[in-house]
Amino acid sequence: MHADSPLAPEAATGFRPRAAAHAEHAMVATAHPLATRAALRILREGGNATDAAVAAALVLGLVEPQSSGLGGGGFLLQYDAARKEISAWDGRETAPQAAGPDWFLAEDGEPMGFWNALASGRAVGVPGLPRMLEAAHRARGRLPWARLAQPAIELAERGFPVSPRLNRLLAAEGMRLADAAARSLYLDAQGRPWPVGHRLRNPAYASTLRALARKGADVLYGGERARAIVARVRASAGVPRISESDLARYAAKSRAALCGEYRGYRICGMSPPSSGASTTLAMLGILSHSALSAMRPDSVAAIHAFSEAGRLAYADRERYLADSDFVPVPLAGLLAPDYLAARAQRIRPGQSLRWAPPGAPQDALALAPPQGPEEAGTTHLSVVDAQGNAVALTASIESAFGSRIWVEGFFLNNQLTDFSFAPEREGLPVANRVEGGKRPLSSMSPTFVFDPEGRLVAVLGSAGGSAIINHVARTLVALIDWKMAPDAALALGLYGSRNGPTELEADTPVARQADALRVLGHEIRLRDDPSGLHLVLRDPTGGWWGAADPRRDGEAAGY
């Protein structure tokens, strides 16, 4: 018998093995076949990787509305092959200017219950995805902006078949949809989710996309649609939360990519407010002191080493990571080789740490650990075009169907629950406390990998809440240390620790190691986790491989 974490990312909907796809020129891997096909259509029409990623993201907001969309945010990496340059875009949601440390405190001054905050206007952050996609396109797009929305508009108007995953998630979450328009769209007259294959149309989303195509992201950050967002949030919260001025002042931010070395490869990802790259690089830095290549991928030794490295890296993440525009984050200290070597020395082959205290990196402030869960309703897509340009995009609305607040054809996020509900603990401030205009800490980890010769060799990322970091780090180990094929790397049973129980994917070979790991002192949690890994990998003999996570509805395809 196994038990899922109560905060598991969305819900598991089965495992369907998929062979990797191969193509000579370009490759796309997304969480839904229709998004993959939209991206390929744009590439064939002369678009580049950025154009294709925007088109796919707009389709994903339609066909997997539980995971991402215009009402959420994300992080995007672009690689310009001609210039050999990486651009990193932060489209994370922000707290309203009126927000403060008491945002998630009850009347008695204690943190309110997570589920009380989740599906309410209190949890809605200012959406960032539309502004980020527009900024990335302005920087490196090739086709006209309006053209990129056309695949999603056509699907929204003529309809798309309900997927098995959407059907199952609606069965689990549909009764929580309070908005009548959303319920009539996704449920039948008896309140049941439409069956698999039912053609679902979303004319409101098509209308929003047509406006977005004509006028750009401004249509969602001012005017009637901005007023509609504010009104819907207020109706849910009972008091003003997001204001029109909050929407008007939102800006996507260009940030420096965060890069580090692992066994001769260069790994690049997002800097804060994402903790994805820093924590992944910390794990890899700790694991560089382990002989992983000599271990079987699903062995007790490998699971033990990986989970212990996760405990140490997540401990530092919980203490020190936050929006670096508000809190000094000691990235150099956290990733210093000597510091990571000292952290690695804490790992014992025959005994689990069970729980790791944070370290004391150079230039770290005295801070308290946070309190609260993190985003779970998320998607990832990876694209490489025929010129070698690439995009890794991870987008989210937080939990399944976000705040459940429906407006203009899409759901609004509940990303503010990614802040720590308690602003201080043990007499010290929490780095990830709520502040007006601040972006909550994220684990989204869009990632590029470059080989020792400097060539782009992999584009990847995942869904999965704070487990994203484990999913991405484990995939990097599978590719670099174990030389696994891309589809085998994604099908490998999930495992790791977020400085708590050692989590093993239920009903996989890694779950059979539970008893042996318990002997080493591991507390075991068996989980069903849909992850959401999507990978594009260079074929050393020519072309590209693509792989989609077998736990979701995704597809990899190219030409």
Image (cartoon, rainbow, N blue to C red):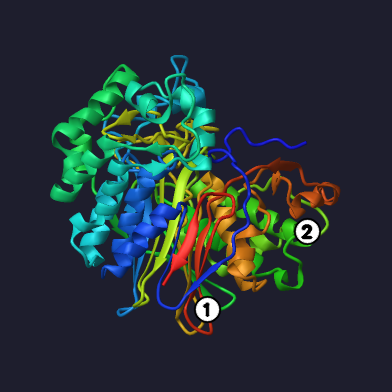
Res 397 visible: yes
x%, y% of residue 507?
74, 47
- Residue behind mark 2: 348
Left or right of residue 408, residue 557 in this image? right
Foreground residue among 242 and 102 = 242
**Secondary structure state at the residue bearing disc 1:** loop
Foreground residue among 173 and 425 = 173
Q: Earlier in the sequence, mark 1 or mark 2?
A: 2
- Residue behind mark 1: 539
Q: CA distance from mark 1 to mark 2?
A: 37 Å
| Amino acid marked by disc 2 | Arg
x%, y% of residue 268?
45, 67
The outermost residue toward the top is 107
| Amino acid marked by disc 1 | Asp
**Residue at left offset 45%, top offset 18%:** 106
Left or right of residue 123, residue 551 in this image? right
Vertical relation: 389 (above or below) 64:
below
